[in-house]
Amino acid sequence: MLYEPAEDSFLLQKQVRKYAKGKVLDLGAGTGIQALAALKNTKDVLAADINPKAVKHCKKLGINVIKSNLFSNIKSKFDLIIFNPPYLPDDNLNLEDDRNYIGGEQGNEILERFFSQAKKHLNKNGKILIVFSSLTSDINKIIKKHKFKFKKLSEQKFFFEKLFVYLIY
């Protein structure tokens, strides 16, 4: 199953349209919505996803894509890394494909792994765009732990959570 674009994807996409330039990585590409948005500003876009169905789907759209578990098959450095991670805590949601939604027990474990590796894949002055939920714990703490700074670009409130898009640098 592919993660179909939803509110988080569209909130992130608005910022991708503003910030995509230079060499761009769309990590966790899913349906390719962010890669396609980035391609409107730059032709140097690489998409990556752990899900073979997502890789196949992106290839059909003409997106340069590889299979990768986070940065496992990524060798380059980028001016912008876009990441719409699984960020919900594991509350036994029993969703059809939990890996599209569940970011670990606290919801932040995948983001922790991401930030522990991200600096090695950023060019000088490179930036990261991420989206996450108010249900995800300790994001600001994780970002600071890995010596990044951040700026909240947008948020959207729902009855049970808020979604945030951050620019990380």
Image: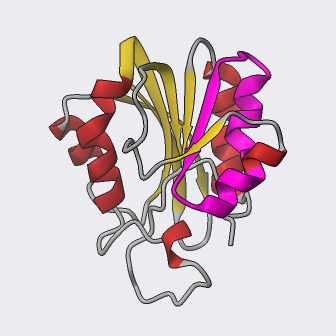
Q: Quadrant of residue 38?
A: top right
Q: Residue at x 29, y 61 (%)?
A: 109
Indicate yes or no whether the magenta region holds residue 55. Answer: yes
Q: Residue at x 30, y 75 (%)?
A: 105
Please state if 163 lies on the left or on the right of 122 as rendered.
right
The reply to whether residue 149 is visible in this rendering is no
56 and 168: which is toward the camera: 56
Q: Quadrant of residue 30?
A: bottom right
Please state if 146 lies on the left or on the right of 55 as rendered.
left
Q: Residue at x 66, y 52 (%)?
A: 55
86 and 67: which is toward the camera: 67
Position of residue 77 measured from the top left corner of the image (x, y, whole percent): 41, 20
Quadrant where the image shows the N terminus = bottom right
Q: Which residues are magenta?
A: 32-57
Indicate yes or no whether the magenta region holds residue 22. Answer: no
Position of residue 88 measured from the top left corner of the image (x, y, whole percent): 45, 69
Position of residue 122 measured from the top left corner of the image (x, y, whole percent): 38, 21
Q: Quadrant of residue 154?
A: top right
Q: Residue at x 48, y 53 (%)?
A: 132
The reply to whether residue 15 is visible in this rendering is yes
